[in-house]
Image (cartoon, grey):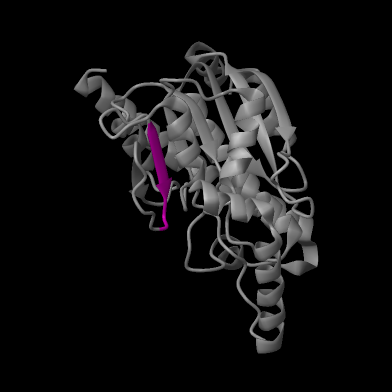
Amino acid sequence: MADGARARCGSGLARRHSDLVDGCRSHHQALLALSEGSWQWSIARLWAPAAASPTRILKSASRRPKGRKVASTKWLERQLNDPYVARARSEGYRSRAAFKIKEMNEKQKFFKKGSRVVDLGAAPGGWSQVAAAAVGSTDANPLVVGIDYLDMDPIPGVILFKKDFTEDDAPGLLIEALGGHKVDVVMSDMAWPTTGHRATDHLRIVHLIEIAADFAIQVLAPGGSFVAKVFQGGTEHELLHMLKRHFNTTFHIKPPSSRKDSAEAYLVAKGFKGSNVAENAEEER
């Protein structure tokens, strides 16, 4: 891609990204206000529950020391008894989450040798590790780019950015890092810090999926795939309809390594139909 065309593409993507972030936020704030009635959750609490950005992050601990101790003990016991935690350690993965994307890929086969991959909400890096190995990414020819606001140690064959994906210039940085090429897989394990309020948390995760899905539609090559974390409550009908319009196959999956008591599942969209479909859909709006 020529430098001038690449710059124009990046500028347009940044504007679209910014508009979508603001639009999704306003839309979900309105939905929450209608659904919550007397709850009257403030916008500040909805969108800034903590000084953190969207990524995988633990819920704030209880202020009560006793409650915190019990929760910490339960978490430690679960970690010690979790076979995937032990496997991650022995196989060199940074987290048990690596097995989730590995199991999904073994069944759906969206990683191929030479594929280009973008990992949104990449910390601590387990998904990027799996992707890099699967596509044959190396430091000399990096094919995987990850982004997260948290610090991450370097991963062989992966370009990492410490940045909030919802910032205007984030999409352009990712594409520039891959030389302006189209992408074969966009995967998102992003999640906002939880508020403890189910309706609020559901709307917030849908907001992130919408941003990630729109990015995927703009940058995927024909036949590409999109994978994103969702929580109990499913995916909004409008979002599913949009994905079905752009992809040949769309479905939910819960890999074996996802804990049975966890509300998480993953949305998978395969067989991207191409930019012409995306452009026609945009004109119809």
Relative image position of residue 113 (x, y in whole percent): 45, 20
Q: Nearest the camera: 248 or 129?
A: 129
Q: Is residue 283 left or right of residue 80?
A: left
Residue most toward the left?
3
Quadrant including the N terminus:
top left
Residue most toward the front?
90
Quadrant including the C terminus:
top right
How many marks on residues?
0
Q: What stretch is highlighted in magenta?
A: 144-150
Rendering quarter of residue 14: top left
Relative image position of residue 179 (x, y in whole percent): 28, 26
Q: Nearest the camera: 214 or 187?
A: 187
Q: Which residue is drawn at 63% across and 28% down?
A: 106
Q: Nearest the camera: 96 or 32?
A: 96
Rendering quarter of residue 63: bottom right
Predominant SS along the magenta part:
strand
Q: In this view, does 159 lie to the left or right of 184?
A: left
The answer, for residue 121, to whether it is visible in the render is no
Q: Does the magenta stretch include residue 269?
A: no
Q: Residue at x 28, y 35 (%)?
A: 139
Q: Nearest the camera: 45 or 97?
A: 97
The answer, for residue 260, to whether it is visible in the render is yes
Relative image position of residue 8 (x, y in whole percent): 28, 26
Q: Is residue 142 left or right of residue 252?
A: left
Q: In this view, does 248 lie above or below 110?
A: above
Q: Is residue 146 magenta?
A: yes
Q: In this view, does 96 lie above or below 106?
A: below
Relative image position of residue 221 (x, y in whole percent): 46, 18
Residue most toward the bottom?
65
Q: Which residue is drawn at 74% across and 53% down?
A: 262
Q: Residue at x 33, y 25 (%)?
A: 9
